[in-house]
Image: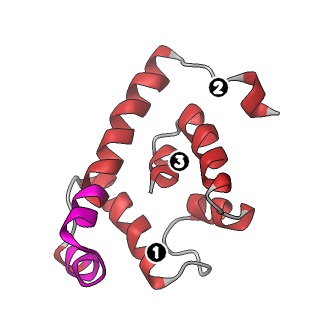
Amino acid sequence: LILRSAHRTDSEYEWVQHVRIGKAAGLTDAEIVAVQAGPDDESWSEADALILRACDEVMTVYRLSDETWNALAERFDHQQLIELLLLPGKYAALAAFINTVGVPVEDALLE
């Protein structure tokens, strides 16, 4: 979800940071590439595609469609649903700041 937000906001800093964190958490290189491709990439499970689709909806129209909300509600509890709604906005705001002031990616992370 955070990687998709970083990709959608073109935040190199957030992208590099969270690729590192994602790999440490077990994401594969193929999954990281698929995040950029989006929810329609054939490699995603139905649940993972739904999460990416939710991120795209929140960041595009600032709400979830009834269809997406209902599908999420079948899979996730109330706390998880709130997190799914808040994370894209939080990282979009952070990306706006980082992109505007030009926070550089640390050299060590680019190696």
Seen from the viewer's position, the closer of residues 11 and 47 is 47
Q: In whole angstroms, how far apart are the C-alphas of marks 1 and 2? A: 28 Å
- What is the x, y in percent for residue 39? 48, 71
Query: Pointer 1: what residue?
Result: 49
Majority secondary structure of the magenta segment? Answer: helix
For label 3, the crowd category at 10 Å Cα-Cα, with few meaning under 14, some 14 to 19 and many 20 or more, is some
Q: Is residue 34 magenta?
A: no
- What is the x, y in percent for residue 24? 66, 53
Query: Pointer 3: what residue?
Result: 7
Give amino acid for label 2: Val
Q: Name the secondary structure under disc 2.
A: loop
Q: Is residue 109 above or below residue 78?
A: above
Write the residue at 44% across / 49% down: 5
Q: In whole angstroms, how far apart are the C-alphas of marks 1 and 3? A: 15 Å
The tag on residue 105 is: 2
| Nearer-N-terminus badge (3/2) | 3
Counting the numbered discs, the total is 3
Q: Is residue 80 magenta?
A: yes
The nearer-to-camera label among 3 and 2 is 2
Write the residue at 55% across / 78% down: 44
Whether residue 108 sits left or right of residue 37 in the image: it is right
